[in-house]
Amino acid sequence: MESLEIPMKAIELKKILMEIKSEGRTWEEESIVCIVKSMVEHIGSTDSELRDQLIYNSFYQLIIEKNKIEHELLNELLELCLSDLLFKGIGENETDTVFTRSFTTLLIALILYRDNEDNFLSQEMVFKIKDILLDYINLEKDLRGYVSGKGWAHSVAHVTDAIDELVKSPKIDKKFYLKILKVLWSKVFVSTSVYIHDEDERILIPILEMVNNGLEQVEIETLIQNVPLELKVQKEQLEEEEYWFLYSNCKTFLKSFYIKVNKNCELVPLKKSIKKCLIEISLY
C-alpha cells in the first residue's frame, strides 16, 4: 500500500470517524483510500472506542453495507493482513499485540464476505488465506476475551468469524473441512485458561456451517468419542489447575454443542454422541 497517502494520527482519525458515525460527515466527502490506510495503521489500537466501535464498524460499513472499497484495494489490504498484521507479536501472551492480530482476522472475515458476494479473489488466494489462518490459530497463545481498560481481544472468537466466511466460500473444497475442523477443535481443548466469553459458541458456528455444507458427522463423532480418553491422559500430565481449566472448556463446549443440535432431526447421531460423552466425563 506504498502508493497511498500517509496515514492520519489516531486522534485525527478518531475525530473523522466519530463525525461520520454521527452523520456530521459522509463517506462521499472523504478520501476513502486515506481513511482506510489510517484505519489499518491503527487497527490494533488499545483505545477500544477507536479500534472496535469506530475502525471495525467503519470497515463493516464500507465493505459490507455500502460496498465502497474497490476490489483492488481489498486485495492490497488482504495481502497486508496476511503478510504482516496477522502475525504481529505472534506467540506473545497478555501483550497489546493481540489487538492487532485479532482485529486483523475480523478484517479478513469482511473481505472474504465481500468475495463471497462479488467473486474477486482467485482460488489460489482463498487457499492461501486458509493455510495462513490455520497457521495463525495454531500459533495464537493469547486467548483473553475482554481485557479491562482496553476492551475486546477475543482472538479465538474473531478468527472463527473469518473461518466461517472461509468455509462458506465455493472456492474451498470440502476435502479441506476435516483439517479445518481439527484445528478449530484444538482451540476448544486448552488448559491455559478458561473461556468465559462465549468462545465455545463462536467456535461452533463454522463447524456447523461445514456440517451443513457436507462435512460428515462421523468425523465429528470420532473427535467426540476421543474426548474421555484424552481427558484421562491429560489428567496424568497436567497440573491440577490446568486440568480443570481443560475439563471446564471441554464440558462447556459439549453442552453448547448439544443445545445447538438438540432440535435438528438431521443431527441425531451427533446429539447422541455428545450426550454419551457428557455422561461419561461427568463421572470423572
Image: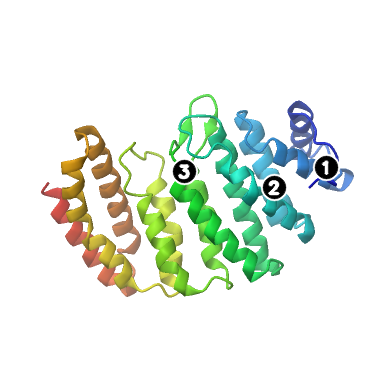
* Residue density around tag 1, few if under 14, some if 14–19, many if 20 or more, within 10 Å: some
Residue at image location 22% in from the left, 60% down from the top: 226
- x, y (%) of residue 84? 64, 45
* Residue density around tag 2, few if under 14, some if 14–19, many if 20 or more, within 10 Å: many
User: Which one is earlier in the sequence, the residue at label 3 or at label 2?
Assistant: 2
Tag in front: 1 or 3: 3
The residue closer to the viewer here, 190 or 282, is 190
Asked whether disc 1 touches disc 3, contact meaning CB atoms under 8 Å apart, the reply is: no
Q: Distance between the residues labelled 1 and 3?
A: 30 Å
- x, y (%) of residue 256? 32, 53
Three-letter code, disc 1: Cys
Point out which mark residue 140 bears.
3
Tag in front: 1 or 2: 1
Residue at image location 40% in from the left, 72% down from the top: 215
User: Which one is earlier in the sequence, the residue at label 1 or at label 3?
Assistant: 1
- Under circle 3, the secondary element is loop
